[in-house]
Image (cartoon, helix red, strand yellow):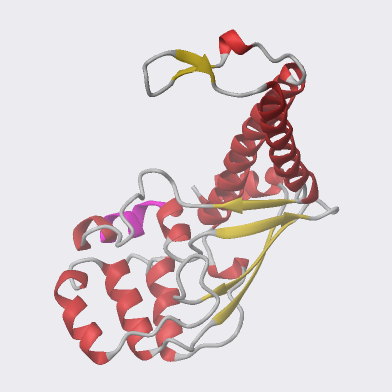
Amino acid sequence: MPRIPTNARLFGEYVLGKQTPITEKDFTPQELSQMLRMIEQQDTRNTEKEKDLQRSLASYQRNLETFEPSENLVQDKKGNLVPKYTEKEYNKEIQNNIKTVERQLASYEKTRDKTAVGYRKERADPEGLKLVDALSQSFTSPAYNIETTLGHFSARKNKDGTVSIKDTYDFLGYGNTKPVKFSMSDFIKALPSAITKPEAFGTLLSRAFLADRKRDVDITLDSKAKAAKTFKEAL
């Protein structure tokens, strides 16, 4: 008999009121390895974004004090080409751009040991997959189980080589800090469209009847080498 998928099991525990923290023991070896893979992929994307910002900063710094009116022309109301900026306005614009990029680069430096992981591009539908597809993914996709359990999550790299994920299992929605509550009339109105999509139905049910309920997430991931070994042993 197939084991109950992680996302379904943890949602069932949530509905039943279980309050002990969700830990690495609640996930399969494949899912733990997938978490590390998702963190690594996001780190790669972050590195590329940081390099882009560094290139932008270098470009802005080169352009500072090199105002060329002929390269910054726009049409006026009469159709004549005129400089878009005065030299003072141009330099002010470049300085503002430099400050913006420097702030963005500083945020990378401040969060060097942290990684914020979001959804994959293929999960663009906020209401989730239809029933048959959701069931299939729940039984076959570690990534889908993670996304439908943790949602967006933040990971911290520790000095001992482990990675910590501390979060809250709830249904507030990304970026919300207060309970999102649905009235009974809202629940009834949304039910027909949500009933065919497990994620949407779970969110609707939770916000209508369990809006104040939450559960801590406290996951510790082992090093990549050990996680990879565990993954191979589970195959």
Q: Is residue 84 above or below residue 122?
A: above
Q: Is residue 216 above or below residue 56?
A: below
| Residue nearer the viewer, 203 or 182 | 182
Answer with the quarter of the image where residue 83 lies: top right
> Is 224 a magenta residue?
no
Residue extending farthest to the top is 70
- Going 28% across and 59% down the picture, which residue do you hit? 134
Image spot of residue 65 (x, y percent): 77, 18
> Is 139 a magenta residue?
yes
The reply, left or right, for residue 54 in relation to residue 10 is right
Magenta region? 135-141
The reply, left or right, for residue 129 in relation to residue 14 is left
Kindly report the secondary structure that dominates the magenta region of the rendered protein: helix
- Going 51% across and 16% down the picture, which residue do you hit? 82
| Residue nearer the viewer, 184 or 149 | 184
Answer with the quarter of the image where residue 63 lies: top right
The reply, left or right, for residue 123 in relation to residue 112 is left
Q: Is residue 133 above or below residue 91?
A: below
Image spot of residue 166 (x, y percent): 66, 68
The reply, left or right, for residue 25 in relation to residue 126 is right
Image spot of residue 233 (x, y percent): 57, 48
- Going 39% across and 51% down the picture, which residue do you hit? 141
Q: Quadrant of the N terminus?
A: bottom left
| Residue nearer the viewer, 175 or 165 | 175
Residue extending farthest to the left is 192
Image spot of residue 194 (x, y percent): 21, 71
